[in-house]
Image: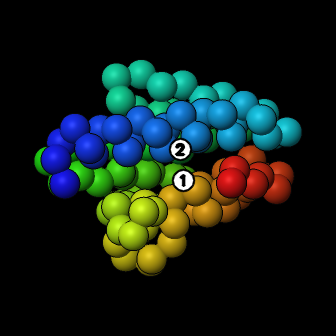
Amino acid sequence: MKDSEFHALVEGRYQFIEQAIDNCDTDIDCELNSGVVTLTFVNGSKIIINKQEPLHQIWVATRENGYHFDWKDGKWIDNRGGRELIELLSDACSKQSGEKVTLG
């Protein structure tokens, strides 16, 4: 994959995440700054999402763990657990907020 394709894919996913957070009923602050998305919860916990250009991956840090996502078959898939990015983020947001969150 070319770097330009990677950046376009990541930006598209970032936009989706921002819109999904804005549209969910849970109070989550979403901030995009210098290629890093920070989700901040009322309890002060955070989820950090950033792109790793040299590896062409998206990395996610939650309160419980860190995850690395590769682009496979049209989806961002965790390279250890095999979960899709938005599915994992929905679960992580639910755990960190204490409310059911569905982003996709």
Above or below, comparing residue 102 to residue 51 in the picture: below
- Answer yes or no: do the residues labelled 2 and 1 have beta carbons within 8 Å? yes
Earlier in the chain: of badge 2 and badge 1, it is 2
Q: Is residue 15 rendered to the left or right of residue 11? A: right
Q: Amino acid at mark 2?
A: Ile
Residue at position x 51%, y 53% in the image: 62
Residue at position x 42%, y 63% in the image: 74
Question: Disc 2 marks which residue?
Answer: 47
Q: Which percent across, then down, holds residue 71?
A: 34, 61
Which quadrant of the rendered structure holds the N terminus? Answer: bottom left
Circle 2 residues within 10 Å: few <14, some 14–19, many ≥20? many
Identify the disc placed on residue 63.
1
The furthest residue to the top: 33
Asked if residue 52 shows in the view, the reply is no
Q: Quick one: SS at disc 2?
A: strand
Q: Quick one: SS at disc 1?
A: loop
Above or below, comparing residue 7 to residue 88 in the picture: above
Pick whichever, 4 or 79, lies toward us: 4
